[in-house]
Amino acid sequence: MTPRVVVLAAPSGGGKTTIARELRTRAPETFGYSVSATTRKARPGERDGEAYHFLTRAEFERRREAGEFLESTDYAGELYGTLRHEVEQVLRGGKHVVLDVEVTGARQVRKAYPRPASVVLFVIPPSPRVLIERLRKRRTESEAELSRRIDIATREVETARREIGDVYDHVLVNDDLDTAVREVIDLVQGGGGGGRDRVQREPGAMASLLSDFVRQLRSEVAQLKQSTGRSR
Ligand code: ADP
Ligand code: 5GP
């Protein structure tokens, strides 16, 4: 097996953290994970060195200037980045390395690891309504932060649609978790077998799936804004 860089990009709430965790639990001998660094505060239950390396802004910037990051970005006012040594260590150990990043990170990683060294997936829930419900259920953000993340999500899905083929190899619909995880394993190992209904391989079909998603997401957001306006 040639170890590859597996990039899971998704709007916040798309399910990339959950899928990445499942990959490591089900196939720990095949998949390793790169722990990112961030300046955002830890959520309850998130441990330093596991969920993220939680850094101060000064420390993050110092390490960025020292060239320690493979890629980094500003997301919702906080810095996030992939440390080179995290990725290289997993690859040296003979495992695929899973990265959970937003869209600018996905683009930078694709450049650093062109096909077939990487496989880049964009993950979406079955519908924008489910996306909003999952974000709400996770209860890790305030309503204001949630609304900011939904706005960013809309822009991210638009970006991904423009970059299909260039950056993204596949759009994965994360409906049933078990199916989604099996599909990622299948794609990374190049099998191409089961679950074809969920993995959109044809660029035109992937683009229209994402256009529909953006359209419906905008209409969900408009309805949400109207109902919050009414309840004031
Ligand atoms: P992301 O890392 O992309 O922001 P998460 O992995 O945190 O997303 O998922 C957002 C929420 O959706 C979490 O509460 C998670 O438990 C839930 N979730 C993720 N995938 C599924 C799925 N296939 N079915 C049901 N709930 C899911
Ligand atoms: P969260 O705050 O929900 O953990 O993450 C916010 C966003 O930052 C998510 O879209 C997540 O995928 C992304 N992210 C997490 N780690 C990295 C990273 O190392 N690089 C980049 N570019 N994005 C990241």
Image (cartoon, rainbow, N blue to C red):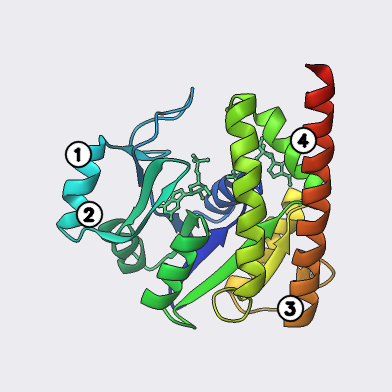
Residue placed under numbered mark 3 in the picture: 201
Image vertical order of residue 226 relative to residue 124, above or below: above
Q: Choose top left, top right, bottom left or bottom right for residue 95.
A: bottom left
Q: What's the CA distance linking mark 2 and mark 1?
A: 10 Å
Residue placed under numbered mark 4 in the picture: 133
Residue placed under numbered mark 1 in the picture: 58
Q: What number is the disc on residue 64? A: 2
Q: Determine whether the beta carbon of the residue marked 1 sits less than 8 angstroms from the nearest atom of ligand 2.
A: no
Looking at the picture, how far across and down is residue 210, in whole percent?
75, 65
* Three-letter code, disc 3: Arg
Q: Earlier in the sequence, mark 1 or mark 3?
A: 1
Circle 1 SS class = helix
Q: Earlier in the sequence, mark 2 or mark 3?
A: 2
Q: Determine whether the beta carbon of the residue marked 3 sits less than 8 angstroms from the nearest atom of ligand 1.
A: no
Circle 2 SS class = helix
State left or right for residue 121 relative to residue 204: left
* Three-letter code, disc 2: Arg
Local packing at callout 1 (Cα closer than 10 Å; few below 14, some 14-19, many 20+) is: few
* Three-letter code, disc 4: Glu
Front disc: 1 or 3: 1
